[in-house]
Structures are given as structure tokens and as C-alpha cells.
Image (cartoon, grey):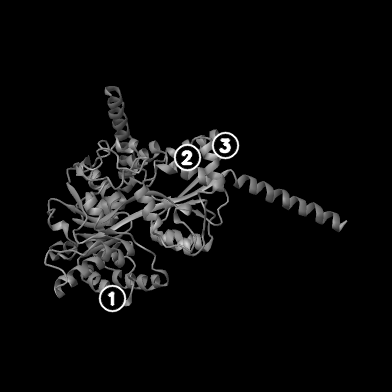
Amino acid sequence: MKRFLYIIVAAAFAFVSCNTDEQRMQILKVYNWGDYIDEELIPEFEAWYEQQTGEKVEIIYQTFDINEVMLAKIENGEADFDVVCPSEYIIERMLRGDMLLPILTPEFVEEINAQDINYFGCVSPYIKEQFGLLEAPEGVDPNDYSVGYMWGTTGILYNKRYVTEEEASSWALMFDKRLKDKIFVKDAFRDVYSPILIYAKTLEGRANGTLGEDEILDIDTIHELMYDSSDESIAIVEGYLKQMKELVAGWEADFGKEMMTQEKAWINLMWSGDAVWAIDEASAVDVELGYTVPKEGSVVWFDGWVIPKYARNLRAARYFIDYMCMPENAIRNMDATGYVSVVATEEVFDTLEDLCYAEPEVCDLSYLFIDSEGNPIEGSEAVMADPVLYPDRSIIDRCGVMHDSGDRTDKMLEMWSRVKGDNLSVGMLVGIIVFFSVLLIWGVWRKVDAYRKKLKLKKRRHHKNKTK
């Protein structure tokens, strides 16, 4: 009798477990940065996936604001995400730690080729080249385990009423005492550490005579500094950041761009995508903002899709990443987020005129827009484009790609903690409290305004298509 009961209980547990596994295979868990997708694409993907495979899937979508917070959840196994979108140096760390599964398996490529829905080739060769530079275990191609999503630069967002473009063209602006309590800095230690190290080494070179008064470091030296997390360099950066700290109103993960649009801050060390959003929003309230990548050099960053090793719904994960590489979806994501997609096809090239938030300039984008034969798309050497979204080749040529600092990361985080401390002034605290009090209303207005802009963009494209 006992044995009979045991068999029944075991069978029941097996049935529940099997049923749970079956239900899980109808769910795709996506972990992405906040405000980093056209949310309408989520249900549209669910319908597209069923159309392509005959299988139903429901997306559970969660967001994060800091790479290290995301990585901690992945490492601790707190949630079984199927698709995650980390930055380049975190992808490097995940590759080293054997935390990823391949995306482009031969079987999957054959499957999507047969359906004529392989969009991975839409990713710019320039982006693939950058991902190929990530350090990985021997025999591992990073491009098999990661697919680019968005990319951009790190620079200075500034208020044109109080700061000139010339002043904003150097990292020296971050140490200008007249801007005390009007400076915000992105709370992302690697994105701050690397540009300040470049600036410090530039000043050192000018002081010891290895660089002329107006000369900057060559790109090979900048690339070398992207790996430099030595005690000496950490100490140098800490010294500069402590000087900057006396002027900084706060370290922000996301609210800095709103503080800029409200003129509670005049400059912000931030990512180009956030700068695009701020420039667009500020123009609606007659605040004129600009963005520069300082002449000394900076960081060009990349975010990409990966599949964690413990992911459950691998098929849907791979289809989702493929779907994000579809040119029309890339355009929609750019329009919704203000960031730049790694997809650089002729369809995207044709929309550059529509994708402008700052004043368009003649830009050399031949490094990014490459045709199927490996040649620059016609006209890409000199095209009118938003220079914040699409930096000219001359800017890219003075920007390095960040790398994982390995076991030195703790040393860098300790330095970052020492620097930050608690330096929010009372006035800025009051300002932040007031800001968050009206955040809900602001958020609703943003949604309405975003919808209005989408309608306007659709009308422009419809008119453009009619006139062709």
C-alpha cells in the first residue's frame, strides 16, 4: 500500500513538473535596460513568433539601470532570464566566466535561412568588428555569443545658455569652479573612469613634453588605456574625481537628463542616447542643450543581446534577437528610445533625415554603413545626420572600447565608493524630491508626446513614399 501511494505521489510530482516545464517553454523572459525598446514590439513579436514557428510565447519583460546589478542577478541565479542586454565589458566578463550560450548555432541559422528571416546580417560590420575585439576564451568567437543592439558615445551634455560649445569640447569643463552644484555625473564607474584617465594622461603628456600644447593621445594609446586598471591609474583617476566631486551636485543613474531639461543642472557627463532624449525634451520647453565628445578622447560603448547559460526558452530567445535586427524594428526602436541601433542597412540610411533631434551636420559615416559587398553605402562619406546619434569618423577615431577589468574590478569599485560618498546638497535634495513629486505627470506627458511624434514621423514617411 505504501509503495502504491509512493508511486501515485511521484507520478503527481512528475506531472506537475512536466506541466510546469511545458508552461515555462511558452514564456520568454527578457531583461533589458529601462526605456530601451519600442514597447509595441513586444506583443508584435509574440504574434510574429507564433506565425513563424506555430508555437505560442508570452514575454515577461523586466528592466535594470546598472550593468553590475544585472550581472549580480545573473551570477546568483536569482531569475532564469532567457535574453539579457549587457554592455560590452560585461559581455566580456560573462564570456570569461562561461555564463553564455551560443546564439548563432548552425541549426538555428539553417532554420531561419529556410524561412528567409535571417536578419543578423543587418548588423554593421563595424559593430561586429568591435564585438570581435572582446576578450574571450581560446576558440570562442564573441560574435557567436553576442549580437549588438544599440551603441553610442560618452560625452558632455551642456546648457547652451551657460556653456559654450568650445568650453564643452574639453573634459576640463568638468572641473570649472563656476559650475559648482550644476554638474551631474552618470553613476557608471567605467564610463567615468576611462574618459577621466584619458584626460589625465593627456595633461600628463603635455606637462612632460611628449605631447604639444594642443595635441591629444593617439588612438593606439587610448585603446591601451581601456585596459588600464593599475593601482597607479586608479589613484590618478581618484585624485581627479575628488576634485570634481567638490563641484558635483549628484551621481545619477537616470534622472540627470530631466535635471538638465529643468535647468537644475548645466552639464552632465552622460551617454549619447540620454543626451538625445534630453535635447528633444528640452526643446519643447525652450531650453537649448548641446552634446559633445571632448577632443581629448572618450568611450564608444556597445550593448548587445546574450543568452545566459541557464536560459530555458532558447528557441524563442534566438528568434527574439533576430527580430530585433530586422531593419524596420531597428528604426522603431531608435525612434522610441533616442539611441542608435547597430543595424546599418540602406533602409536605416534612408531614414537619417527623419532621425534628427539635434541640428543635422555633414558626417562621414562610411565606417558604419557598409553594403553587402563590403563597400560604404553610396553617399555615406558625407551625409546630413544628427551628429549626437551618428558621430563623425573623426570622433570615432579618438574613442576606445571599454574592457572588463577582471579581478581589478573590486579595486575600481572601492575607489568609486570613496569618491562618491554623500555629496548631494540640501538644495539638490529638495529639487530631486520636487522632481519625483511631478514624475507621474511628466511620464504621462512623455507618453502622449511620444505618440504624437510617432504619428508625425509616419506622416512624413508616408508623404516621402508618395513623392518617390
Residue occupied by mark 2: 118
Along the line of sight, the residue nearer the viewer: 468 or 18: 468
Residue where numbered disc 3 is placed: 53
The correct choice, above or below, for 432 with respect to 229 in the image is above
Left or right side of 280 for 63: right
User: What residue is shown at x 32% (from left), y 65% (from top)?
Assistant: 226
Q: CA distance from mark 3 to mark 1?
A: 55 Å
Task: Name which of mark 1 and mark 2 comes first in the sequence.
Answer: 2
Secondary structure beneath label 2: loop
Q: Are marks 1 and 2 in contact (CB under 8 Å)?
A: no
Q: Nearer the viewer, mark 3 or mark 2?
A: 2
334 w.r.t. 235: above or below: above
Of 197 and 10, which appears nearest the observer? 197
Q: Where residue 125 sits in the image (x, y, percent)?
A: 37, 48
Left or right position of 109 against 301: right
Q: Residues within 10 Å of mark 3 (few under 14, many from 20)?
A: few
Q: Which residue is mark 1?
A: 235
- Using the image as rendered, state which of residue 122 and residue 385 is in the foreground: 122
What amino acid is labelled 2 in the image?
Asn
The kind of residue tagged 1 is Ala
Assign a secondary structure to mark 1.
helix
Q: Where residue 285 sits in the image (x, y, percent)?
A: 20, 42
Q: Identify the disc placed on residue 421.
A: none
Residue at the image point whose x is 29% and y is 22% from the top: 466
- Badge 1, how many Cα within 10 Å: few under 14, some, many 20+? some
Q: Residues within 10 Å of mark 2 (few under 14, many from 20)?
A: some
The three-letter amino acid code for the residue at tag 3 is: Thr
Estimate the x, y position of residue 301 in percent, counting from the top left: 33, 55
Marks 3 and 2, the one that precedes in the sequence = 3
Q: Name the element at disc 3.
A: helix
